[in-house]
Image: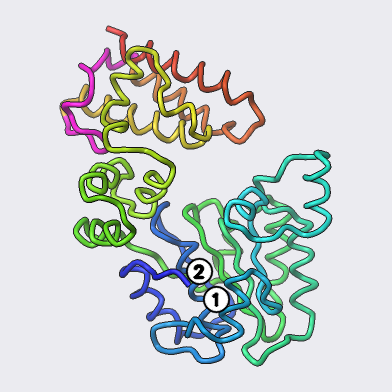
């Protein structure tokens, strides 16, 4: 079992003794919603829990570690399941292996219906059953309404954890049927200490934490994906030259996020305020405010379709070209 960040450990100890059949763990992205939700589920199912969480040694904890616990279900988009090494159901795995379709970026209604069957099965242990839904905002309307009916008439001995960084996108009726726990940002010192404990060098950690807007888990993701402090600092002037550099290896949603951060900081400089994600010395001289504003709006429009199956290479080329024009505009 992985060790939780200190701010998540505090939240876990607050949540473990509380009652309720459905919890909504919410907060800004990168605060560790998934990690907290998984630790909470593991603690609920543990055969020998402590006030600090699961024991980490019993058959229940081992079952979750190896992704085969009979009383635990995880509902995620198939892309998320694969990224986090959770198994797909046999039908989905066969369809994807046979290239009949791509892994879904939504929580499919088929998976939700399988969860309903699971809820009505006899539990195998004495600690009840747990369903973890993450990221909960990735339920489409059909899936969400299927869950809503279950939350209105919850099955016995089953608890739900919904984890999200976009609670406003959930149906109000779903939110109203959950007890809510909001995660708060850790202070910089705690975040940097934790990143150091995750083997992120201190010089890298400070830059990547700033790049992540103070979100420690996002900073760790940057590091694990090979983003370096030097690469981050050099990004603006690289794009100024029309070069993609290390963005070539990044997924489209990450590229878009990086461009939006650069756009934000360039607009901040143009308005006479301090940048948030980059050092001012690493940014080019601000272009015309109108040009930067238009670029920012285009990036927001791109966010609505970033999950579409575009050609990644052509998409990156278009984004880099647009960034170069915006940064060089007068």
In this rendered view, identify the residue nearer to me: 3 or 257. 3
Secondary structure at badge 1 equals helix
What residue sits 38% from the left and 81% below the top?
13
Q: Give me the C-alpha separation between circle 1 and circle 2.
A: 6 Å
What residue sits 51% from the left and 16% below the top?
318
What residue sits 65% from the left and 52% below the top?
77
Please give the count of numbered marks on the rendered protein: 2
What residue sits 32% from the left and 15% below the top?
240
65 left or right of 13?
A: right
Q: Quadrant of residue 156?
A: bottom right
Q: Residues within 10 Å of mark 1 (few under 14, many from 20)?
A: many
103 left or right of 159?
A: right
In this rendered view, identify the residue nearer to me: 100 or 304. 100
Where is residue 220 shown, x and y percent of the image?
A: 37, 51
Using the image, determine if residue 153 lies above or below residue 200. below
Boundaries of the magenta span: 273-291
Secondary structure at badge 2 equals helix
Q: Residues within 10 Å of mark 2 (few under 14, many from 20)?
A: many
The answer to if 188 sits in the magenta stretch is no
Where is residue 243 shown, x and y percent of the image?
A: 40, 16
Q: Main secondary structure of the magenta part?
A: loop
Mark carried by residue 37: 2
The answer to if 274 sits in the magenta stretch is yes
Mark carried by residue 263: none
Q: Are marks 1 and 2 in contact (CB under 8 Å)?
A: yes
Q: Quadrant of residue 76?
A: bottom right
Mark carried by residue 41: 1
Using the image, determine if residue 102 lies above or below residue 259. below
Where is residue 59 shown, x and y percent of the image?
A: 61, 85
């Amino acid at each position: 079992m992985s060790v939780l960040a200190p701010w998540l450990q505090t939240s876990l100890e607050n949540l473990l003794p509380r009652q309720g059949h459905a919890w909504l763990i919410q907060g800004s992205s990168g605060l560790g919603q998934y990690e907290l939700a998984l630790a909470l589920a593991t603690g609920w199912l543990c055969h020998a829990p402590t006030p600090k969480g699961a024991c980490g040694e019993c058959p229940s904890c081992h079952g979750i570690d190896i992704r085969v616990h009979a009383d635990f279900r995880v509902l995620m988009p198939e892309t998320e399941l694969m990224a986090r090494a959770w198994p797909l159901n046999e039908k989905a795995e066969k369809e994807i292996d046979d290239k009949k379709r791509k892994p879904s970026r939504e929580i499919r209604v088929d998976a939700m219906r399988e969860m309903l069957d699971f809820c009505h099965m006899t539990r195998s242990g004495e600690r009840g059953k747990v369903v973890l839904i993450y990221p909960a905002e990735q339920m489409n309307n059909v899936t969400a309404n299927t869950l809503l009916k279950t939350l209105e008439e919850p099955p016995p001995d089953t608890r739900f954890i919904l984890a999200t960084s976009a609670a406003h996108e959930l149906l109000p009726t779903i939110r109203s049927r959950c007890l809510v726990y909001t995660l708060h940002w850790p202070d910089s010192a705690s975040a940097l200490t934790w990143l150091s404990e995750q083997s992120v060098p201190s010089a890298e950690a400070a830059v990547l934490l700033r790049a992540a807007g103070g979100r420690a888990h996002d900073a760790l993701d940057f590091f694990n994906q090979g983003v370096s402090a030097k690469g981050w600092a050099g990004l603006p002037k690289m794009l100024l030259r029309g070069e993609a550099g290390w963005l070539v290896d990044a997924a489209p949603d990450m590229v878009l996020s990086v461009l939006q951060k650069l756009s934000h900081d360039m607009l901040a400089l143009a308005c006479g305020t301090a940048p948030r994600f980059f050092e001012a010395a690493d940014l080019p001289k601000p272009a015309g405010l109108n040009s930067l504003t238009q670029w920012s709006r285009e990036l927001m429009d791109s966010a609505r379709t970033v999950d579409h199956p575009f050609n990644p290479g052509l998409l990156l080329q278009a984004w880099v070209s647009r960034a170069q024009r915006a940064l060089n505009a007068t």
